[in-house]
Amino acid sequence: MSEVAISPDPSLHELDRLAGLAEDVIRRARAAGASQAEVAASIDTGLSVNVRLGEVETVEHTRDRGFGLTVYFGQRKGSASTADLHPDSIQATLDQACAIARYTEEDPAAGLADAARMATAFPDLDLWHPWDIDTAQAIELGIAIEDAGRAHAGISNSDGASVQAGQGLSVYANSHGFVGRERGTRHSLSLALIAGDEGGMQRDYWYDSVRAAGDFMSAQALGDKAAERTLARLGARSLSTRQCPVLFAPELARGLVGHLLGAVSGGALYRQASFLLDHVGKPVMPGWLNIDERPHLPRGQGSGNFDAEGAATRDSALVEGGVLARYVLGSYSARKLGLQSTGNAGGIHNLIVEPGAADGERSDFQRMLQRLGTGLLVTEVMGQGVSIVTGDYSRGASGFWVENGVIAYPIEGITIAANLRDMFAGIVAVGADVDPRSHILTGSILLERMTVAGE
């Protein structure tokens, strides 16, 4: 029996090429006088197709390259980047970074992350799932999604469906001798629809985002979901101004957690621009609530073995028993604060908000509506009225008025307001209806009270 030849994976070859380039540039930076150097190189490829009313609107193929270099001459830092991996462009980037570093002021916090923090283990996190789909297949899928949504009675128009397949290769290397390779895929489907009646027009959408195309919801299910959401908004009305309990749907609840992250991240803290300054070790949420970072979840949207500086990522509590356990720091912000990096240069890696409540129940969405009782379910927020400095929160919103645990009618044209400090402390329950499409994994979040401003 003859042996079947297994062709080598071209992505691994590309990673090796990027790693070799990065190591060579670091050697050249050291030869040019840099005391430390770091390189981030990437290649991103993708296909994006948009269809509307059964016709192709756009087809886009992308192949983007990036190469960024930072050099340190003592405590002086210089950075430069290019989108061209040609040797002449790389050399010009190196020369530019060195020139910048020689003329900048010294910064005591500048420099690579500590060598002892570099990642040494690189388990496979199951992030690489290239989607073998060509343009014709993507168009066919987009049309199928749109057809499924438009088939619902009452849907009058479409803003289109999109199909996107993407994959990225990246290498981070520095003069500690660290070389980290990463490869990952991200694919998405979406549909936006329009419905109308005598009360006016309404628009809504749905999308799915996955690492592996086999994990997508079906085209039929996505079309149905987008249509159901759109039709549910017909007949929306406003509310009189009041205070009431508010339930944030899962896809919006993660935004609340994002505001917490903004307030406990290094940049806001060393600039004295956070309402949670000096709050480590203090209660910020109810005593039953836990939030954990889990960087190594298989297929996780935010999974990674190392951060943007090569520091190893690890499982770690952010909020433990309602108490803020730590800040979210890279090495620069840690040095500015006199603390240690938490392995979060470049952001957080998979944050899990544990479902629960004071009574210990893990509630599905229907049970969360019953917990809400009579109050507001928020499904969309608008505007940028959130201050991380003061914690003040005021945003336009729409959603549904709920009475006795049952959705009564759609709501629009209102503003919801409170202070984030009170909102976090007033969390009544976190649902088990987790939205998996983000690196912040949370179910719906029920707040005890907010001000709703309407008519």
Image (tube, rainbow, N blue to C red):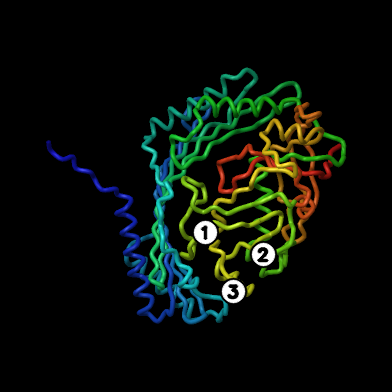
Task: Give the image location of residue 126, x and y in percent.
Answer: 42, 46
Tell me if I can see residue 129 in this picture: yes
Residue lying at the far top in this picture: please name it: 153
Q: Earlier in the sequence, mark 3 or mark 1?
A: 1
Q: Earlier in the sequence, mark 2 or mark 3?
A: 2
Residue, x 38% and y 42% (percent of image)? 130
Give the spatial CA distance, label 2 vs label 3.
14 Å
- Label at residue 335: 3
Residue lying at the far front in this picture: please name it: 360
Q: How many marks?
A: 3
The quarter holding residue 38 reads bottom left
Mark 2 or 3: in front is 3
Looking at the image, residue 248 sits to the left or right of residue 340; the answer is right
Q: Nearer the viewer, residue 392 or 86?
A: 392
Q: Earlier in the sequence, mark 2 or mark 1?
A: 2
- Label at residue 314: 1
Residue, x 38% and y 64% (percent of image)? 179
Tell me if I can see residue 381 in this picture: no
Q: Nearer the viewer, residue 66 or 297?
A: 297
Looking at the image, residue 355 sits to the left or right of residue 11; the answer is right
The residue type indicated by label 2 comes to Ala
Decide: is 80 above or below 453.
below
Decide: is 433 above or below 69.
above
Q: Which residue is mark 2?
A: 268
Task: Give the image location of residue 431, x and y in percent.
Answer: 67, 39
Q: Are marks 2 and 1 in contact (CB under 8 Å)?
A: no
The quarter holding residue 23 reads bottom left
The residue type indicated by label 3 comes to Arg
Name the element at disc 3: helix
The residue type indicated by label 1 comes to Arg
- Label at residue 379: none
Q: Nearer the viewer, residue 159 or 192?
A: 192
